Structures are given as C-alpha cells and as structure tokens.
Image (cartoon, grey):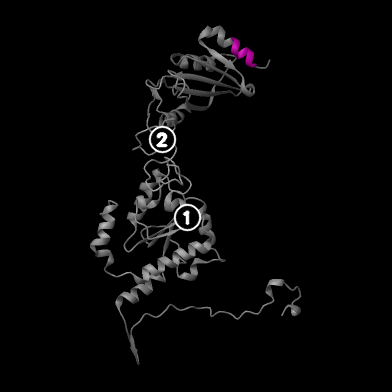
Amino acid sequence: MALTNDHIKQRLIEKFGDQVSGFYEPWGMLTFEAPKALNLKVLNFLFDDKELKFRFLTSLCAVHFPDLPGKELAVVYHLHNLVDNVRIRFKVFTDIRTPDIYTATGLFSAANWLERETYDYYGVNFVGHPNLKRILNVEEMDYFPMRKEFPLEDQSRIDKDDEMFGR
Amino acid sequence: MGAKMARPVAYNLVDKKLEPDISMGEMPEGHQGEGFFATKLNHVIGLARKNSIWPLPFATSCCGIEFMATMGSHYDLGRFGAERVGFSPRQCDLLMVMGTIAKKMGPVLKQVYLQMAEPRWVIAVGACASSGGIFDTYSVLQGIDQVIPVDVYVPGCPPRPEAILDGVIRIQDLIGKESLRRRNGDKYKGLLESYGIQ
C-alpha cells in the first residue's frame, strides 16, 4: 500500500484537527502549515507514526514575507520518508518581532547546522538550540542579510555611488 | 623547409632564428674600468631581488586557473625568475591574491600577509581581488586593499595569463627601483599602521 498525499493529510487532520491547515500540493508535494507552538508536536507525530515515518530532515530554511503582518517569517521543514520515498513540506509562521521557534535538534541531528544557518540569515531564534551562533557569515555581522529590508549590495562600499551603479 | 618535411605543417614554414637561450638582466648604471665596476648597492640588490621573486599563490577561484596557465610551459612565469612558487608565507616575498575573497576569508588573508617577512609585495589579480568584482554583496570583501596594502592591481575577469605576466613585470619594476630605506621610512610605517599592522 503506497503512502499517498491524501492519506498523510487524513492522518494529520485526525490527529491535529483544524490546527493543521493550508494543504496544497505544488508539483505533487504535499505542503501544509501549523501554528508555531505545535511545530515539535507535528514533527514528532510525523516521525513516530508507524505509517508516516518521516525520519529524514532534508532541509530547513526560512522565508521572509514583509507583506504578511504577524506572519513575516516562515520556517520550512522538508521531510522525507525513506521507506516509501515520499517527501512533504511543513511550514510554521512567526511574527518577526518575536521570532522564537522550538528547535528540532532533539529530533533531527541535521537540524543543528540548518537552524544555525537559518538564524544566521533570518534571525530566527531557535529556542533550546545547543549552539545558536552564526555559521556562514562573519561573527561581527550585526544584521540578518536575507531579510528583505536589507539591500543585496554591500553598504560599506563608497566608490559605487554614481549613476552607473544605481546607488 | 616545408617541402622537406614528411608531413608539412602550415604554421612551421617561416624560418625563425633561435633566441639566445639565456637572457641577461640589464646592467645598472655605474662606473667601470679594467677589472672593476662600481654602482649603488640599491641597484645591485634591486637587480637581484626583482629577478628572483618567490610568489605565494593565494588562489580562490577562476583567476587561480589562469595563474596555473601562467605557471605552465606555454606562458611560463619561470622566465622571469619566479619559477619557485612557495606555499609557505614565511619564505615568499610576492603574495598573489587571485579570486574572490569573502569577508570571512579576510582575517585569513591578513594572517598570511603578516606571516611573510619584509620586504614583501602584494599583487591583486582580477576584478574580485581588486574591487569585489561582480560580487557586490554582503558576504564579499570589496577589494583586498581593505585588509592589506596592494602594490599592483591586474584588471580582468579573469585576466589572461599575459595580463598576469604584465602585472608581475610591473612588480619587478617596483622591486628593482625600490629604495633600500623604504621599509624603514615613516611613510611605509604609516601605511601599515593604517591597516592596523604593527
């Protein structure tokens, strides 16, 4: 019996009711969201369930949506069931003023560096992370460069201010 | 000539006289007579230094590939006395920075520069090392002259081996003409101090 998206969706709704929402399937990949307080409960359920067995965290990242007040930051988990070869995508949203989200490091060792990267670029504060510090950028950096309010170009540069560079 | 060859090749038809296989450095100005030659110590040391550069390649991306071609038999940096590429900063006197230097790499580059003994020279090869190049972004150092002093900039993205050779020849000019007192002068010390060195 193959593990279908409909079946996963049904199991999630049985367990969490209307707290899981926003189901859709871009290019056949089941995607849904949940309140950020529930993120570990959902991940644990997906991990432990006898049928679902989503035990591999492929990727973890954040997205900044400046136009969604109260839901500016999305943290996205990509999960993989290696037995049935099924992938799903799970999102939680948070307010950018309180970007606190429970860490998934207790469940997935892979989350350690991925959460550090997400903190590095978006400033998501993973509560309970054992070593939450910058991983890719210089430690002196005092902002989160992938947030949309920061221009891509290096602002410390003064010689590119003419009309040729649009500064 | 072509007719005599078993398989004539089109580009081998013109007889070209062999160049003398050893080229000599130009003699510095001075006084000479029978059995003696007198000149400034400056000139002699400059002549020796500029024809025996030990380059330290600090290659991080595509300019480094061009440098490999420059060191290869076709372009052959060895013709300029820079045959011996050292991979220890302690023994080298020309730091060749080739490629994008990320901000996180900045302190590493500075450490390598500090480990080199005086006199030392720096050449920034390519747009990235000179100015950050196309990588005008939060993570890339906008030119290595933000962390260490640079003597010669080679433009290009990446520069051809000829351009790198030209840069080395310009470095040779600088080395040959450099005053022996320059590294003790206030101007040079001020330059290093502006980079927080010493």
Indicate which label's residue lies in the foreground, 2 or 1: 1
Examine the image and state in which quarter residue B10 appears. bottom right
- The residue that disc 2 covers is A135
- The residue that disc 1 covers is B126
What main secondary structure does the magenta stretch of the protein show?
A: helix
Q: Callout 1, which amino acid? A: Gly
Label total for image: 2
Q: Nearer the viewer, residue A50 or B104?
A: B104
Residue B196 locus on image (x, y percent): 27, 51
Q: Is residue A31 above or below residue A118?
A: above
SS of the residue at dot 2? Answer: loop
Residue B37 locus on image (x, y percent): 33, 86
User: Is A35 left or right of A30, judged from the image as shown?
Assistant: left
Residue at position x 32%, y 61% in the image: B117
Q: Is residue A42 above or below residue A82?
A: above
Residue A158 locus on image (x, y percent): 37, 46
Using a 10 Å C-alpha cutoff, classify the residue at mark 2 as few (fewer than 14 neighbours), some (14 to 19) or many (20 or more): some
Q: Is residue B64 above or below residue B21?
A: above
The quarter of the image holding the C terminus of chain A is: top left
Assess whether residue A8 is covered by the magenta stretch. yes
Magenta highlight range: A4-10
Residue at position x 35%, y 72% in the image: B46
Assess whether residue A54 is covered by the magenta stretch. no
User: Is B111 left or right of A15, judged from the image as shown?
Assistant: left
